[in-house]
Image (spheres, helix red, strand yellow):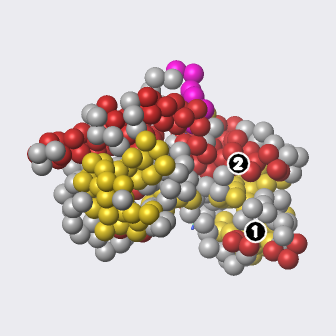
Amino acid sequence: MDRRDVVIIGSGCAGHTAALYTARAKLNPLVLEGHEPGGQLSLTTLVENFPGFPDGIQGPELIANMRRQAERFGAEYKLAHVTAADLSKRPFTLQVGKDAVETQTLIIASGASARWLGLPNEQALIGHGVSSCATCDGFFFSGKEISVIGGGDSAMEEALFLTRFATKVTLIHRREEFRASKIMLERAQKNEKIQFLTNTIVEDVYDASQREVTGLKLREVNNGKSWNFPTSAMFLGIGHIPNAKIFEGQLDTDQDGYLETTNFIFTKVPGVYACGDVQDRRYRQAITAAGSGCMAALEVEKFLEDQGH
Ligand code: NAP
């Protein structure tokens, strides 16, 4: 049995920062990377709002740097996914496949995963023209007309990125107003390759029988009219769902599944802290995730000290 003072679940911005701080405190942290190593930053392109990089930095490069920095001080990484957790007594027990890990403290930095629309044919076409990752799959649609769904920063970012490949990008949003920041929205609006379809809902995606996307069934919200819209791909930018399911019944969540915390990072179980997108429904930025990862690490240090470790 692997016995630790601190285990960190998740390897995005929050997890790496928690690893860096706990490693520098000589706590020998184990980071369980999860099934989306590097988190959301590893799926983005240019990050322009992380302080310290005046010309921006590629998301995957930023996340790789963070990991390297934590490893330099002794953080240990394991490509593993936690399937169950027992937080009823300390040491806490985590199930990782067939193995178990015991830990005195736990930092949950498991982030959030892409949300899907739940359309009848959506799942069947994932990987065949339905995608939640423009940077992963955009290249396959060079010279094609494609669609992006959503009205937030993610959708704008995806639409802008996809103009590198597509001849035309149609951004489809269910309302007239956008949630995206002004700067991102304006960039998308100024791009001649991007057209906007607002007040429009996607009802289904075709054609599962051909195993490729040929079009969308859309509905105009104002008049209820449905029509078929030809497109070669549907990229989703409709937000994320927090990865907190394994803590159901042990930790409190809000109605959307975000872990409830007090003073930013304290869960209701002493010695268990949550940071980054799994608990932050308000800011959801790389820099705030890093900041809360730091806070969690400092609290772990204090908690272990108070326990006489
Ligand atoms: P978000 O801000 O929550 O926006 C999600 C969008 O998807 C909203 O426009 C929402 O529509 C739409 N949506 C949600 N569920 C839908 C459904 N079932 N059907 C149709 N549309 C649906 O999420 P996000 O864009 O992923 O951004 C998350 C956070 O990351 C934000 O804080 C954002 O600022 C940040 N972020 C920043 C950058 C950047 O600065 N470069 C890039 C990406 C993300 P409604 O508006 O109608 O609710």
Q: Is residue 86 above or below residue 237?
A: below
Q: Is residue 188 above or below residue 206?
A: above
- Tell me the element at label 1: helix
Is disc 1 surrounded by few (<14), some (14 to 19) or many (20+) residues within 10 Å?
A: many
**Residue assigned mark 2:** 136
- Tell me the element at label 2: helix
Horizontal side of 1 relative to 49 (left or right) equals left
Q: Position of residue 140 (x, y in %)?
A: 82, 50
Which circle's residue, 1 or 2, is located before the other in the chain? Answer: 1
**Residue assigned mark 1:** 125
Magenta-drawn stretch contains 58: yes
Tell me the amino acid under the disc marked 2: Cys
Provide the residue span drawn in magenta.
54-59
Q: Is residue 92 above or below residue 11?
A: below
Horizontal side of 209 relative to 236 (left or right) equals right
Magenta-drawn stretch contains 134: no
Spatial separation of the CA atoms under disc 1 and disc 2: 16 Å
Quarter of the rendering containing residue 271: bottom left
Tell me the amino acid under the disc marked 1: Leu
Q: Nearer the viewer, residue 253 or 297?
A: 297
Extreme front residue here? 1
- Residue at 58% of width from left, 49% of height from top? 154
Q: Position of residue 155 (x, y in %)?
A: 62, 51
- Label count reads 2
Q: Report whether residue 254 is seen.
A: no
In the rendered image, which quarter contains the C terminus? top left
In the rendered image, which quarter contains the N terminus? bottom left
Is disc 2 surrounded by few (<14), some (14 to 19) or many (20+) residues within 10 Å?
A: few
Q: Does the beta carbon of the residue at mark 2 sit less than 8 Å from ligand 1? A: no
Q: Position of residue 57 (x, y in %)?
A: 57, 28
